[in-house]
Structure formats: C-alpha cells, structure tokens
Amino acid sequence: MCNNHRLSCSCGQSQANLLFKNHILNPSVINNIFCPECSRNVNFDSESMLADNNWILEFDVVIARGYLHRANINPSSLSPAFIFDEGYASWNGLTPNELDQRLVERQQIIGLAKQDMHLYLEQIKRWGSRRAKKFREAGWRKAQLC
Ligand SMILES: [Zn+2]
C-alpha cells in the first residue's frame, strides 16, 4: 500500500493509483494522466501515450529510458506499452481506481463473516476471479493478461 502513488488527471476530476515496479521509475516519468473526460481532447501520440479504456497515460519516454538504463534495462524499443505492460509504471490494480473499489467491496464481504462464515469463505474465493473476469470483459489492458 505504501508503494501506491495517487495522481490526479489533467482535468483534476479523477485520480489514478499507480505502481512503479521495483521503484525503478517514479512519477516524474508520467507527463500527464487523462481520465475518460479529459482524454476526449487529447491528440493521441502512440510514441508517448498508452490508452486503456478511455484513460490515457502520457510518459516522458526520455526520462524513463534514463532510469531504466541506470537499472540495466535496455529494451530494443522502449514504448509506452513496454513501460506499462512490464509494470514499471502501471495501474495499481487492474484499473486506475480498482484499488479504491476493492477496499469498499472487501469491506462488504468481510461484513458477511460475522453473519455467515460459510457464505463468507465462498464469496471471498469467488470474488477475485469474478473481478478479473469483469475487468477483462470491460476491456482493461491488464485484465487481458490474467
Ligand atoms: Zn480528467
């Protein structure tokens, strides 16, 4: 949890939870985050941007390259997809705000434990796979891999 970075989108209406694998990169490689609202006006540039379900992450690829190089990571082509898919700068969770939803949903299930332990165990088991399926069907990039 302490590794989570909560960053505001460009219009300020939304926030995204980001995780930087092994702390090789940090928020300075994120030039902009666009939520589904503010991404409408963005001229998409595939050299620096990654789109995921109407959210857009804009990277400073030069800074990212520098940090990765320092960690001895030198991919032949450093693309936004590489940075994101390898987890060097990625959502914390399957979506920008899964983390927050997860806490709320988990609280609801935990409430069940007091009433019905059997039902609780069943629910908590099915919860994870159901969530992944839901996000996969919604088209989230990270959910396609699980
Ligand atoms: Zn926004």
Image: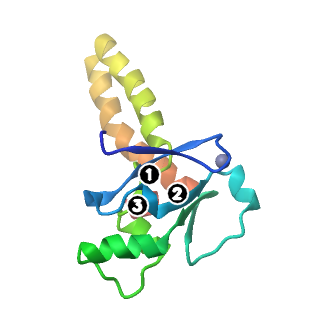
Say above or below: 6 vs 80. above
Callout 3: helix, strand or loop?
A: loop
> Which of 95 and 67 lies nearest the eye of the viewer?
67
Number of the front mark, 2 or 3? 3
Q: Residue at x 35, y 56 (%)?
A: 20
Question: Residue 94 shows which numbered tag?
Answer: 1
Compute the Cα span from label 2 to label 3: 16 Å
Mark number, residue 140: 2
Q: Determine contact: label 2, label 1, CB under 8 Å.
A: yes
Query: What amino acid is labelled 1 in the image?
Result: Leu
Residue farthest along the right direction in this orientation: 41
Relative height, residue 47 to residue 40 (above, below): below
Above or below: residue 68 compared with residue 106: below
Task: Measure how far apart labels 2 and 1 are at the Cα level.
Answer: 7 Å
The residue beneath circle 3 is 89
- x and y, in percent, of residue 85 in the image: 40, 67
Q: Earlier in the sequence, mark 2 or mark 3?
A: 3
> Which residue is found at the position 29% from the left and 63% from the top?
24
Q: Is residue 31 left or right of residue 64?
A: right
Of label 1 and label 3, which has the lower sequence position? 3
Q: Callout 1: helix, strand or loop?
A: loop
